[in-house]
Image (cartoon, rainbow, N blue to C red):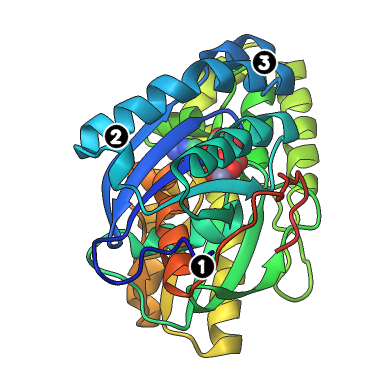
């Protein structure tokens, strides 16, 4: 049976994202996001990182109210939905299972198509949500807590990873540096906040020399550790006295590592439309430096609004919309997967 409703009415998609520690639901009609509700999980702060089992339990508690709120905000009834989308991979398996089982049950009970979405592809396509969109082919620097990639997007559903991290992700570099500075998890936004008051050229952390378009952040983390050990050995209050300058210098180096590779990728591919995406693209220093570099290089630059940078179901919905237009449908036998393969 072909359950696709066809071209007679609007295409309304309900999407669920639950890959890590945000429970989110969005409603998208004909490619426009009508609502994007995101519930974070404070429970992890005290542990200095996401605790997978606690994340799954929080998703179970949050998912019904989040879906309900997304429908209400969009002014949408369950009966007017065309398809249900969900994040299938990658992520924490327990978290993914909550979203995927919920989505499958909803699609089954409403007798409408199910669409599985790859989380990293969705981060890239978050750039198609605003009015001003990049033209294909475009390059996207996708920087999150688990990934750092340069993606060549040839069309909405055709993408190639042309560079990626060999060890830590950019978000991990932020969060692990923050931890060394005694800041709570997730430290990325806090480094961003303190860096605004600091001098980025005060301390010089090394830029790794990795061939090609790949990244490495583990050496930076070690360099910061040794630097802080040495400085606090001489003055135990060193961090407290110099926090803005330390944060600005760490952030400055992470940004230069990211943007130097992006510049190289643009030269190699000849692509002129460039985007950033993922949680770290919420970083104010990266946004500013990316726009500045774009002006220098003559690129057209695109950055999703804040709510579509960190994990959100809006990006899952827009990706599912393109899959729906392409005639894709996922069988109910699909299972969630923690692994990152595209
Ligand atoms: O995409 P995301 O929400 O979740 C993953 O899929 O990982 O990214 C989360 C990451 C965390 O490492 C967090 O510290 C980082 O994004 N992040 C930031 C900022 N906001 C979020 N890093 C630096 N500056 C920010 N303003
Ligand atoms: Zn993400």
Circle 1 sits on which residue? 140
Out of 47 and 202, give the one closest to the viewer.
Answer: 47
- The residue wearing badge 3 is 54
State the image coordinates of residue 303 (x, y, percent, origin top left). Answer: 36, 59
Whole-percent x and y of residue 87? Answer: 58, 46
Residue at the bottom extreme, as displayed: 270
Q: In whole angstroms, how far apart are the C-alphas of marks 2 and 3?
A: 26 Å
Numbered disc 1: secondary structure: strand
Disc 3 within 8 angstroms of ligand 1 (CB): no
Q: Residue at x 69, y 24 (%)?
A: 180
Give me the disc on residue 153.
none
Q: Secondary structure at mark 2?
A: helix
Q: Nearer the viewer, mark 1 or mark 2?
A: 2
- Asked if residue 96 lies left or right of residue 285, the reply is right
Which residue extends farthest front? 1
The label nearer to you, 2 versus 3, is: 2
Q: CA distance from mark 1 to mark 2?
A: 31 Å
Task: Mark 3: give few (<14), some (14-19) or many (20+) Cα within 10 Å.
Answer: some
Of badges 3 and 1, the one in the foreground is 3
Measured from the top left, where is residue 46 in percent x and y?
63, 9
Measuring 40% from the left and 58% from the top, which residue is drawn there?
Answer: 318
Disc number placed over residue 71 in the picture, else none? 2
Q: Nearer the viewer, residue 70 or 189?
A: 70
């Amino acid at each position: 049976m072909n359950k696709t409703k066809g071209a007679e009415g609007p295409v309304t998609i309900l999407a669920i994202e639950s890959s890590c520690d945000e429970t989110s639901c969005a409603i998208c009609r004909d490619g426009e996001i009508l609502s994007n509700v995101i519930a974070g999980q404070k429970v992890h702060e005290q542990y200095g990182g996401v605790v997978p089992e606690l994340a799954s339990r929080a998703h179970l508690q949050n998912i019904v109210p989040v879906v309900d709120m997304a429908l209400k905000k969009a002014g949408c009834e369950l009966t007017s939905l065309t398809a249900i989308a969900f994040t299938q991979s990658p992520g924490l398996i327990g978290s993914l299972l909550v979203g995927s089982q919920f989505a499958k049950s909803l699609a089954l009970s409403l007798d409408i198509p199910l669409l599985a979405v790859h989380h990293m592809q969705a981060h890239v396509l978050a750039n198609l949500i605003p009015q001003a969109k990049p033209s294909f082919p475009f390059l996207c620097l996708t920087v999150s807590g688990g990934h750092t990639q340069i993606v060549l997007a040839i069309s909405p559903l055709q993408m190639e990873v042309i560079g990626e991290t060999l060890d830590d992700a950019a978000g991990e570099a932020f969060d692990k540096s923050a931890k060394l500075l005694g800041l709570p998890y997730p430290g990325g936004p806090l480094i961003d906040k303190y860096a605004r008051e600091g001098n980025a050229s005060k301390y010089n952390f090394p830029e790794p020399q990795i061939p090609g378009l790949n990244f490495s952040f583990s050496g930076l983390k070690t360099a910061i550790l040794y630097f802080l050990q040495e400085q606090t050995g001489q003055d135990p209050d060193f961090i407290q006295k110099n926090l803005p300058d330390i944060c600005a210098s760490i952030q400055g180096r992470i940004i230069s590592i990211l943007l130097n590779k992006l510049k190289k990728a643009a030269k190699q591919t000849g692509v002129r439309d460039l985007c950033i995406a993922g949680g770290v693209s919420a970083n104010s220093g990266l946004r500013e430096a990316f726009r500045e570099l774009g002006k220098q290089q003559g690129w057209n630059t695109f950055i999703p609004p804040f709510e579509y940078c960190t994990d959100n179901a809006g990006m899952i919905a827009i990706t599912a919309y393109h899959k729906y237009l392409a005639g894709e449908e996922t069988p109910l036998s699909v299972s969630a997967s923690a692994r990152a393969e595209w």
